[in-house]
């Protein structure tokens, strides 16, 4: 069986690799072995950070809600518990947007939460 040399295919693979690592610092964008390692590492970080972004946004919404609740004399944990008791299912993103852009509606929700907490106690 004749020996197969991947001339054109290998060249295409290298072109594809170097196109994806364009802009990496130092030898990571020019040296084949380092470029391969850097590409794998960058893809792992991209995967991880897509999930971390969701975590960071949830943390931001909770911080905003906590501040909005504190200004209305109710703790965040009580607020969330009261939402469950009142069977109000609005996610934290919408609640934080409401607290910023529509404070009157947020005040009404806080009142409903307070009523549900009083009736449960």
Image (tube, rainbow, N blue to C red):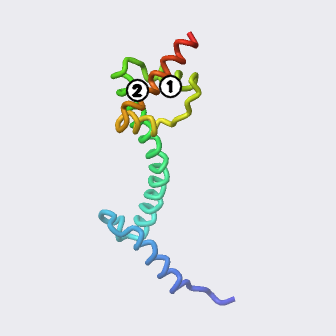
* Residue occupying the point 52% across, 12% down: 118
Vertical side of 21 occupied by 65: above or below: above
* Residue occupying the point 42% across, 41% down: 57
Vertical side of 121 occupied by 111: above or below: below
Q: Which of the 4 quarters of the picture holds residue 66?
A: top left
Q: Which of the 4 quarters of the picture holds residue 36?
A: bottom left
Residue 85 placed where, x, y %? 58, 22
Which of the pair 96/52 is nearer the observer?
A: 96
Left of 90 or right of it: where is 4?
Answer: right
Residue at the spot of label 2 = 107
Please give the label number shown on residue 80: 1
User: Farthest residue toward the right?
Assistant: 1
User: Farthest residue toward the left?
Assistant: 26
Which of the pair 67/4 is nearer the observer?
A: 67
Which of the pair 25/81 is nearer the observer?
A: 81
* Residue occupying the point 54% across, 18% down: 116
Residue 3 placed where, x, y %? 62, 87
> Regarding mark 1 in the picture, which secondary structure is present there?
helix
> Regarding mark 2 in the picture, which secondary structure is present there?
helix
Crowding around mark 2 (Cα neighbors within 10 Å: few <14, some 14 to 19, many 20+) is some
Quarter of the figure that contains the N terminus:
bottom right
Please give the label number shown on residue 67: none
Residue 70 placed where, x, y %? 36, 22
Q: CA distance from mark 1 to mark 2?
A: 14 Å
Vertical side of 82 occupied by 65: above or below: below
Crowding around mark 1 (Cα neighbors within 10 Å: few <14, some 14 to 19, many 20+) is some
């Amino acid at each position: 069986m004749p020996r197969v040399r991947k001339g054109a295919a290998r060249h295409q693979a290298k072109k594809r690799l170097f196109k994806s690592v364009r802009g990496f610092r130092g030898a990571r964008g020019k040296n084949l072995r380092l470029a391969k390692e850097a590409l794998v590492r960058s893809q792992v970080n991209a995967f991880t950070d897509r999930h971390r972004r969701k975590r960071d946004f949830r943390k931001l919404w909770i911080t905003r809600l906590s501040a909005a609740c504190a200004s209305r004399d109710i703790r965040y944990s009580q607020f969330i518990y009261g939402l469950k008791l009142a069977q109000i299912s609005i996610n934290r993103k919408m609640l934080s947007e409401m607290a910023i852009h529509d404070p009157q509606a947020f005040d009404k929700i806080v009142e409903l939460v307070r009523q549900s907490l009083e009736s449960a106690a």
